[in-house]
Amino acid sequence: MLDVAPRPVAGREDALVVDLPADRLAQVRRLRTAVAAFVVLHHDVPRPRSLLSGEHLTRIVEAVYASLRVAGSSTFRFEAAGADSPTFARLGDEFARATGLKLDPTDGELVVKVRRGARRDGDVDPGWDVLVRVGPRPLSARTWRVTDFPGAANATIAGAMVRLAGVRADERVLNLMCGSGTLLIERLLAGPAAAAVGIDHDDDALAAARDNLEAAGLTRRAALVRADALHPSSWATGPGADVRPADLILADPPWGTLHGSHSGAAALHSGLLRAAHEVAADGARLVVLTHEVKVMEAAVRAADALWRPRPPVRVYAKGHHPRIWVLDKLA
Ligand SMILES: C[S@@+](CC[C@H](N)C(=O)[O-])C[C@H]1O[C@@H](n2cnc3c(N)ncnc32)[C@H](O)[C@@H]1O
């Protein structure tokens, strides 16, 4: 969280603006549900070529330095219509000279977006906005992720799942099918919990989760259990390894071909709703992220005696539009 309130951005539903002095820019690294943070500069110029002139270039270079002070990069790239045009080649040369960064059009770390400004009433020309990303990677690239895992959840989405469910310090948290631990870690970083357990049936997943929990400094706050998440009667019940009855249950079941198959998705989603209900405390919330939207809708309808769904939230991840469901336990 930042200590200044965000404001809406005219014409955009996917962005908020905050007025943050340059010396407090590093605060954006604390944001857990933002995909990326940019320093936004508006230029009253008719075309990008005019950004080459002294005063405009100076402002952009200052923004690049502000970003580099938060986290270093050695390369940059443009994201703009016409990024491969001669105008952007010249802009790239000037930036490279002024900042010492190297232009790498495909993999450049520091992203500089150049786009039309938002048109306001009475504007003859909306000018151009230049957005300089803070840091070489999106904010979803957490420092705790030391071991990758195929199909790992996007940490920004995981942060949003936790926020949607609400964080209660006395709750017992269960992450079913925890994979490399993204949901568990984001929940524990969001605030205290009475206890936390992650369950997966795959040793590689649990090893990745162990590494990531350690990197997050959370090893002592969570236990990992190797078990079939759909069959609670088979789970270990050792001290610290059991959070039943759980107040908050998090899950992102397998999808596609990585850890499952579409043909098994219906049984898996309905099995998840059933198993979660079996181990849930009164008043528990179940939060599920899934790409199998139709399958989940059907499973939720069939489980209407177990869980009451809140309206699902559509999110965007790597070309897909999965949904987040928050479900409240019925008696
Ligand atoms: C999409 S991945 C979870 C990714 C995880 N959230 C992360 O960020 O790494 C799905 C996980 O479900 C696990 N899984 C699938 N079926 C399972 C079952 N019946 N019991 C336990 N784990 C299961 C897989 O091993 C895999 O780790």
Image (cartoon, helix red, strand yellow):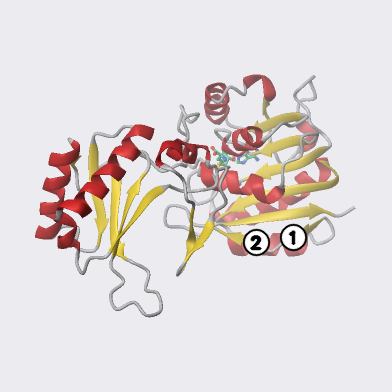
Q: Please give left or right for residue 15 compared with residue 286 in the image.
A: left
Q: Secondary structure at mark 2?
A: loop
Please report the residue visible at 46 percent of the width from the left and 68 percent of the height from the top. 10
Q: Is residue 324 above or below residue 195?
A: below
Q: Quadrant of residue 194?
A: top right
Mark seen at residue 309: 1
Q: Residue furthest right?
A: 331
Q: Observer-nearest residue: 30 or 177?
A: 30
Q: Secondary structure at mark 1?
A: strand
**Type of the residue with mark 2:** Pro
On whether ligand 1 comes within 8 Å of the CB at mark 1, the answer is: no
Q: Is residue 291 above or below residue 213?
A: below
Question: Which residue is the site of mark 2?
Answer: 312
Please report the residue visible at 40 percent of the width from the left and 74 percent of the height from the top. 120
- Residue 250 position within the rendered picture, expressed as x and y whole percent measured from the top left: 68, 43
Q: Observer-nearest residue: 311 or 65?
A: 65
Q: Please give left or right for residue 119 compared with residue 159 in the image.
A: left
> Ligand 1: which quarter?
top right
